[in-house]
Amino acid sequence: SVATLGNLGIKPNDFSGFRAAKTSYDVTVPNNVSSINVYANKGHSGQTISGTGTKTLNVGTNTFNVMLLPNEKL
């Protein structure tokens, strides 16, 4: 089973440098940004992605996890 993302990012204030093998990203957004939209694209069909969507931000460090489950072979 393979579990790789095709893309990952946030809106607004998207970041560059996505790599499928990278598992952690740090992004700084302006203080007036109160929420972001986390998006991810599957690297392979049949995978399941969780942890995307609109996220409310607090002042300071915010941590969000995007989980990718591989294809399951029956």
Image (cartoon, helix red, strand yellow):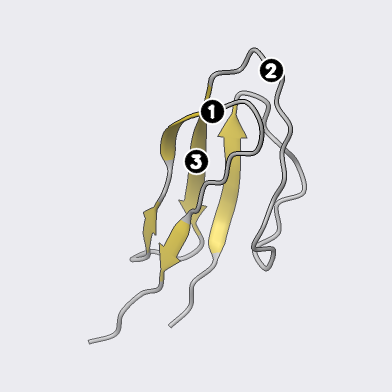
Q: Are marks 3 and 2 in contact (CB under 8 Å)?
A: no
Q: Is residue 52 left or right of residue 18?
A: left
Mark 3 packing: few (<14 Cα in 10 Å), some, or many (20+)?
some
Disc 1 target residue: 57
Which of the two discs, 3 and 2, labels the residue nearer the N terminus? 2
Quadrant of residue 27 within the rendered picture: top right
x and y, in percent, of residue 52 in the image? 43, 43
How far apart are the two marked residues, 3 and 1, measured between alpha carbons?
A: 16 Å
Q: Residue at x 69, y 17 (%)?
A: 31
Q: Is residue 47 left or right of residue 64?
A: left
Q: Is residue 46 above or below residue 52?
A: below
Q: Quadrant of the N terminus?
A: bottom left
Q: Say which element carries label 1.
A: loop
For residue 39, which numbered disc appears in the image?
3
Mark 2 packing: few (<14 Cα in 10 Å), some, or many (20+)?
few
How far apart are the two marked residues, 2 and 1, measured between alpha carbons?
A: 10 Å
Disc 2 target residue: 31
Which of the two discs, 2 and 1, labels the residue nearer the N terminus? 2
Q: Is residue 12 above or below residue 26?
A: above
